[in-house]
Each structure stands twice: as C-alpha cells, then as structure tokens.
Amino acid sequence: MLLLSPITLVAAAALLFAIHLIRRITSPLSKIPGPAASKFTSLVLKWKEIKALRTVYIHKLHQQYGPVVRIAPNEVSFTSWEALKEIYCSGGSGYDKTEFYDLFKIYGRRTMFTTLNKADHAKRKRILADRYANSNVMKSASVTGVQERSSKFVQRCTCAPGGVSDIFMALHAYACDCITHHLFHPYGTDCITKKQDEEMMHQHGFIDRLISHYAPTLHRLFSKVLYLFAKPRETPLADDYVLETSQLSGTASFTLMSRFDEKTGDLDYIDKAAECLDHMAAGIDTTGDGLCFLLWELSQPRSLGTQRKLAEELRANPDTPFDKLPFLDAVVCEGLRCFPPIPMSLPRYVPQGGRSIDGFWLPEKTVVSCQAYSVHRLNGDIFPDGDVFDPERWLEAEGDADRRRIQFAFSNGGRGCVGKHLALVEMKTLLRDVYSQYSTTPHESMQEEAMAMSDQLISARPLGQKCLLRFQPLDASTCTEEPKRQHDIIKMSQCPTATTGNARAISGHHRLVGWAKMPMGAAAVGSELSIDLQCKYQNTSTSACRCLGTITCMDQYTYVHVPPVLDTKVQPGPEFYMLGRNIPSVPRDAFEHTFTFTFILGSPDNPRMPRLAADSPSQRTYYLMYRSTPSSAKERQHRRAEDASDALPSVLPVLL
C-alpha cells in the first residue's frame, strides 16, 4: 500500500484549497456585492438560519450592500421588482424550486407545494386550485364557517379573566379550525374550545424538521433521549386526524376533499392525506402568525389612531360586505406588507443556460431568491418609510398599481400561495369581529422583545410565542369631558351601605384628595394607581389612608378595585370598587385627563357586582383626574408652570 508523506498530504491540501479559492474568486458571482465570507463559505448563513435570524440577517445585508447581495458561494438575494418578476413569473411559473422544499415532504410524498419543476406543479394545481378560487372561498357556506369560528375566537378572548388573552395560541386555534373547515367540513376541528383538538394543533409543525435538517446527528440523539422518558405516539394526533378524515364521505361541496372525490388524477389515498396535512400546516402557521403580528401592532399606542379609524368604519357599515370596506382592506394590505406570512427567502434555481438578473450574469444552478420582508421595506419609491406601519398609503390612488404588483406576501406568479383568498377572508372576518366591538391594548407584562420575529423554516412567529392583549368593549360610554379645574375636580362621595352586597362594609364617607399619576401615553386600563382618601367611619375619628387600586374591565364597565383599607383605627376597612365609564388611553398630547367614577362596595368573588351596582340608587359620583408624567424637558417645564398656577393641595379639609 502506497503511503504518502505528511509533506505530500499538506501540499495536496494546499493545492486543493488554492483551486477552491481561485474558483471562488473567478466565479461569475465574484462581482456581486456581499460580505467577504460569503464568497468562500455558507457557514455564516447556516448559523443565522439555526439561530432563526436568517431573514433579519439578509435584510441587513441588503441595507448595507444594496438590492443584489451574494449571501453564500452559490446563492444570491434580490429585492427589486424586476428580479422578483424574472425569478417567480418568467416562463409561465418562474424558475424551478431547489431541494430546500424536500423538507416539507409528507409521508415521503411530494405535495403541490413541494413539487420542484413547473410541469409537476401545474398537473397537481389543476386538481386543487378550483377549491381555493375566490368564487369558491366566498360561497355562503364557506364564509359562514369562517364567521362562526371568528365569533368563537372573540368569545374565548373576551371571556378570559380581565379580558386578557394570549392571542398567539387563540389565533393558531382559529386558523386551524378555519383551514380544516375548508378541507373537511363537517369534520373540521374545534381547537378554540376543545383541548384535545388544540393539542393536535400544537403537535403539527415544522420545528422538529428544522433541527433534523441542520443537525441530523443531534436530532437522532435528542429523539432517543426523549424516548427514555416518554414513548412517542405511533402516529401524531394530526396524522391520525387527517388519515381518518380523508376516508370519510359526505364532505361539503366547497371543501378540498369533495374535489378529490370528483377528480383525483393519479393521486392515491396517501397522496390526498399528504396534501391535506400540508395545507393544514400552511394554514395554521402563516395565517396565525401574520394575524398575531398585526393585532399586536394595532394594539400599540402608536397605532391607536389606526385602530380608532378602523372601528369607526366597521361600526358605521355593519351590513357592508367585508371585502367592500376600503380601510379594512388597507389595514390588511399593510399588515401583509409589514408582517408577511412567509417573510423568508423562496429559493429557486437559475435555469439551464444561465440568466442575467439586475445586470449580473448568473450561471445555471445558481440559487436565487427574494424575501418578502426586504422587498416590502427596501423599495422606497413604492413604499416610502418602509419600516412604518401606515395603512393610509393603500388609500392613495397614485402608485396603487405598483404597490399591489410588488406585494409579495403570498409569493408571486403561478406558484404563489394557492390559499391566499381563504387567508384574506379569515383575516378580514376576524378583524371586523374584533374591532367593531372591542379595542385592544397590550398587557403590562408584554415586552417588545417577545414579539421579535423568529424564523421557522419558511414562516416566522413571535420569539416569545405569547402575545397577551386586553380586550375592552366599545359599547361602554367613553368619557370625553375636558379636564376640569381644581374646584370642579374634588367632589364629595358618600359610600353606599352594606345592602349593595359587601357584608363587611360599614357606612362612612370617602374623599379623593390627591392625584393619580401614570406615564405619558400609557393605557389606563390595567394600570395600578395610588389613591389618597380621607375616611371617616361611624364612631371613629377621621383618618387619612392610601390605597393601591387596579383598573380592570368587566361586563362593559371599567372599574377600579381597591382592597380593604389598611387603617389600624378602622377594622375591618371597606373593600370597594369605583365603577366608571370605559377608559380610553391617555392622550399623548395631554398632561391630564378626567374620568367619572362612582363608589361601589362589592367583592371580587361576585362577578355580577358591576351590573348590580349600576342599578343601585345609593351611588355618589366624584371625579378622578389622571396627571401623566412628562417625558421631555419641555413638558416638565410646562408642568412646573402649570403646577405653580393651579396646584392641588396634598390634603384637603374633610367636609361632613
């Protein structure tokens, strides 16, 4: 056996490395801008993918290098409309897909989404596309099913304690119920209300495939470790559900299964089940995540005006079809622009013979792609201020054709998302049901970091996989009074007697004597505030006390719950509520705002307390003024001048 000396081996390795460098340097792609490392290795890109940061990483590269970037030795990313049109629309249905899509094969079968060449895709699409056509999606039976599931979503969120709900989970349940309704009605899931169905939804995802793709050895080891603790099911719940339901008869005429009964081509039972399971995955993740990001944005203080305008349109046009409401359409379009269901790259192979894209010659088999996240944000001539959520841009006639042409949320061309019409119906129906009845604000525990985009192979979800929002009914009256002067703010309030439901109550008088402070622009509901009271009870002396109240909502009322007054001279102290009108967010441009409340005695264990109290003749009214904390030097200077001219005393005489 011939043995090579160490020197020979080193020389051979050096020669191979030199050849590799020469090929990279002289490659037709060498002139394309990009980081130096991308000319020689794809490890940086793979590392970003593993960390779920691929989309943001490529976006930053485009910001640095321009509309054409070499992101790996054989991969180039584009952001222009011309490139998008060439890659995804030319030659009928654009370039062929890469082996990346093998990750999404189900039961070892290719679905319409995972077919690589145009011919196979067109053959499968001829069977399926009919059921996703807008004319079929808009049929009464189809739309009614979506509306029923939207109503269940609203009920689930608004009946949660304090009106606070995790919409991330609820929206995925809603999306699952909608897509299975379209696939299998009347055999669809009920994830919104049934725990077993919701568990099935959780099992169905691509996270495990992400691990197996980038670290197969780790994936095999991890699976064996899990097996030691709990034997996995022979077949996951989603597989069981689809395999069983696919064999049932009597599905509605608008469903995909009914289409399979009419026209199957050469598809067998497993092919049909694989196609349905693929549509479930796409329908759950893309619609659920996209709606989650959109509702989060609408709930931010910066989008308060948008939320109000949307509510005004919806409430003023209760009988108008959802697809005829211009501002609702604008909100959805802007949501899809800023938070596309598929924000990541959709890779394709350059066809045989090579192609020229955006002035660069690319040899065949070069991987090329566009990602919606960057296309929507970096074409400033079409979308000025691309990082700003601004639905108003979609109401402008000028440039409308360009905006809609470059909309890449559902991909583009003949291989674009076949379910986009269903997704739009789901989004518009849910937004209408929510914002025609409720306003939404973030729960105080939510942080912006939790809503950062985390890549999931081809879709993206919030990093924290949680989104807590508070739902406030719009039907409750909103206080619109201008802030009152000092002599109008402080009012005497007589505490109701024990007949209102609190057996521990004792008669007495309360008086507001201080300010309740909160941050500039913060939402009042859910906030904690200190309340200074002067209290006098029967057979006791007058004493001052401070209570910490929490603003919450119940039964279309807003109220402040104040626990029993902690005063050693008065035992037991009364536990009371201040029932008020629905509290809006404190205006950013106002230093103070006034709301009307009444004292109500009650118990947190009595959920009917607010409604019972509303009929009580023993109510007395006083005014509570929020004074927001200034956030700038100019505001603080203005505040000092205002306080000097019209300050409230810290303690006022008790008037009995």
Image (cartoon, rainbow, N blue to C red):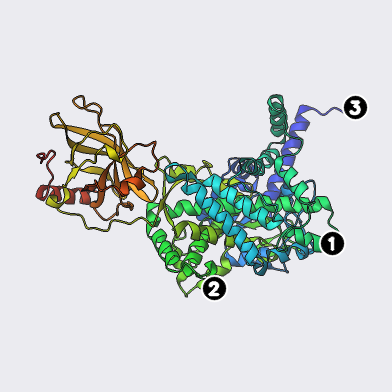
Residue 178's label in the rendered image is: none
The quadrant the C terminus occupies is top left
- Rate crowding at label 3 as few (under 14), some (14 to 19) or many (20 or more) other CA atoms within 10 Å: few
Q: Which residue is mark 3?
A: 1
Dot in front, 2 or 3: 2
Observer-nearest residue: 576 or 251? 576
Q: Position of residue 417 (x, y in %)?
A: 66, 60
Does residue 84 appear left or right of residue 529 in this picture?
Answer: right
Q: CA distance from mark 1 to mark 3?
A: 58 Å
In the rendered structure, which amino acid carries the disc numbered 3? Met
Residue 25 visible in the shown view = no
Q: Quadrant of residue 448?
A: top left
Q: Position of residue 101 (x, y in %)?
A: 72, 51
Give the mark nearest the N terminus, 1 or 3. Answer: 3
Residue 401's label in the rendered image is: 2
User: Which residue appears farthest toward the front when viewing the image?
Assistant: 499
User: Answer yes or no: do the residues labelled 1 and 3 have beta carbons within 8 Å?
Assistant: no
- Rate crowding at label 1 as few (under 14), some (14 to 19) or many (20 or more) other CA atoms within 10 Å: few
Q: CA distance from mark 2 to mark 3?
A: 72 Å
The kind of secondary structure element at disc 2 is: helix
Q: Which residue is mark 1?
A: 265
In the rendered structure, which amino acid carries the disc numbered 2? Ala
Q: Position of residue 621 (x, y in %)?
A: 22, 48
Q: CA distance from mark 1 to mark 2?
A: 38 Å
- Rate crowding at label 2 as few (under 14), some (14 to 19) or many (20 or more) other CA atoms within 10 Å: few
Observer-nearest residue: 635 or 613? 613
Residue drawn at 74 percent across, 48 percent down: 242
Residue drawn at 29 percent across, 54 percent down: 587
